[in-house]
Amino acid sequence: MHAYKNTNSLKPFIILLSGILIVLSVLPIYLGINTLSAKVFGDFSIVIMNLLALGILIYTAWLSFKNNKGTYKPWLMFVIGQSFYALAELLYLASDFSTNNYSLIADPTFMITYPFFIIGILLFIKKPFKLQTKVFLDLIITIASTFFILYFLLIEPRIQLKGLLSTFSGLLYIFLDISLLFVVLTLLVSKNKKISELTVLFLLATVFSQILGDLVFAYNNLDPNLFYQWLSTIMYMLSPSFTALAAVSFVKNVNLDLSLTSFSKILKPERSWQSYIPLVLVLFTYSLLFISKTVDKVLIGCVGVIITLIVIRELISLDELKKTHKDLKKNKELIEKSEQQLNFISSNMMDLITESNEAFVYKYVNNSSHSFLGYKPEEIMGNNLYDFVYPEDVEIVQRSVETAIKNHSSERVQYRCKKSAGDHVWVETIRKPIFNNENKFKGFICSTRDISAQKENEIIVQDSLKEKEMLLREIHHRVKNNLQIVSSLLNLQSYHVDEEEALDVLTESKNRIKTMALVHEELYRSPNLTNISFNEYLERLVSNLFYSYGINKQNITPKFHMEEIKIGIDTAIPCGLIVNELVTNSLKYAFTDDMTGNIEVNLKADGDMYAMKVADNGVGLPADIEPENVETLGLQLVANLVKQLDGNFEINRANGTEFQITFPEQEYTKRV
């Protein structure tokens, strides 16, 4: 569908063209219509208008070649035809200034223009082209009527006055004019065309102006009259003017303004205005019987032929009406059958199907309402949908209704409906809003299903889930307690050990166990039992280590720069053990005697990875210790745990010791 503009964009050009035509039409009267100068000026005006039309057609063809190749060839044919037409008018103008009779060359030149115009018009029709029989008969009646009108007004007087031989040129002009009229009317009635209807109407006006000009010109030859000469000049100026308007309407993409009431009524399919054209021409042909001074048998025969064509057309119309009536009757039976089938299906559906208007009042309710809510359909219809919603769920339903209208989309909502017995039933409703062509809300179509059994199952599942959650919390609690017992046993054992090395081993083992116990304690306290707040966990872990080694925080200060991050147990335990080993190593070896300093723990997320840093500003790690070659148990444990996390770590010895560790979140692996 083309996005056409309205006719307002054509007004400046129409005003300009009308002004030129008025000036060129009035000047001959001012000069004196009976003078030779007026005739020369008239011929000169026709040449000017044709050259103007030619220039506009050339621009239109160039623009079509550049932007719309599908219409380039038709406009090119118009350019060629208009070029020959302008040349013929120049030859007529030259005859006014010369003793040579250039009109003998001008007439054949005029006739050459017609095939190009006819081909151009036919090229505007899209394929495939279909023409209804009735429309085809309308065209035949139009052409026949036009031919008979021109024959009796133009040719017959020539035969009587000048003989048959002198009328050959006139007959040929009539044939070409009628052929041109036929193809324009064919384009007009075609539904598949490459140009707007307004452009076609301008082309039709071009053809009518040309035919009227030829008719007046021919009468002027039979009975020379200065008024006929002036009138034919105006018609011959109008013809290229309408051609120019057709080209401009195409370039500006203008069509008829169908928003106007008059046009919308005229263009309705049931009152197709094109079908009035044959009627007008037939009436005009029939009026020739009254205008003619003597009733000519040939004229009566011609009118009879046209009437016969009209009768045939009406018979075809009657046949089409019978077929249409038969199809309508068949369609009505199919619709009634479909409605019965639809009523049968909706009446036997388990779901409750309803329709409400824009005020949410029920217009239709199927028979499922009785088994569903205990109400008959007629007891529900006429009531508001909120009348059957459980009071505590009204707000939920209102939000669903507002969202559906706002988003122009279906909404699914679960709520409770009141039953006739006074109890309620859990339902799920899919609510689809209805809008008219003006996008105005008109109501809802709803499908409601009983989900009481589903809700009961949900309660069972929720109870089972709570039971398992309690059990899981109890497991974490007991694991934490058991690890705490082991830590306490190691603590008791340390009181009976005198060797410093053995005491260090027991203390480190105790802290590792506390690290793991702390994870289970955090999980026990966590709302979802699947992950813990890792930043809070690390702060507690470091504080426990400071307490375990009796570190004064005024001498060695812990610093934390951590984002809010939640991770699962599979990642938390190895990470916690890594931090335990690195902070323990800093507390034991980074600061000697009365040294003061900081231990820094950083944690942040970096896409799918986590970056963790443990650093101190103590004496620094010996240069011979590398990540890939460590002998101490603590750093071996760190290396193994980083590998377990699919991560990597680096050591920076500038200004103390800094461990940079990156690792991803570990996915849960099912245990057998």
Image (cartoon, helix red, strand yellow):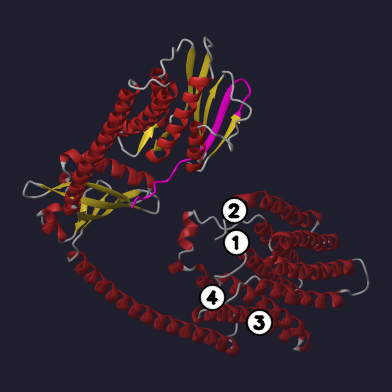
Percent x, y of residue 395: 24, 38
- Classify mark 1: helix, strand or loop: helix
Q: Earlier in the sequence, mark 1 or mark 4?
A: 1
Q: Label 2 vs label 3: CA separation? A: 37 Å
- Classify mark 3: helix, strand or loop: helix
Q: Tell whether label 1 touches label 2 (CB within 8 Å).
A: yes
Vertical comparison of 547 with 18: above or below: above
Q: How many other residues sit within 10 Å of disc 3, few (<14), some (14-19) or many (≥20)?
A: some
- Location of mark 3 (residue): 151
**Magenta residues, as a range?**
652-672
> Which mark is on residue 278?
4
The nearer-to-camera label among 1 and 4 is 1
Percent x, y of residue 571: 42, 39
The residue type indicated by label 3 comes to Tyr
Q: Label 2 vs label 1: CA separation? A: 9 Å
Instruction: For residue 352, say whether it is visible.
Output: yes
Vertical comparison of 269 with 628: above or below: below
The nearer-to-camera label among 2 and 3 is 2
Residue at 27% x, 33% y is 482
Q: Label 2 vs label 4: CA separation? A: 27 Å
Q: Label 1 vs label 4: CA separation? A: 20 Å
- Please check the rendered image and state whether residue 192 is part of the magenta-colored stretch, yes or no: no
Residue at 32% x, 25% y is 493
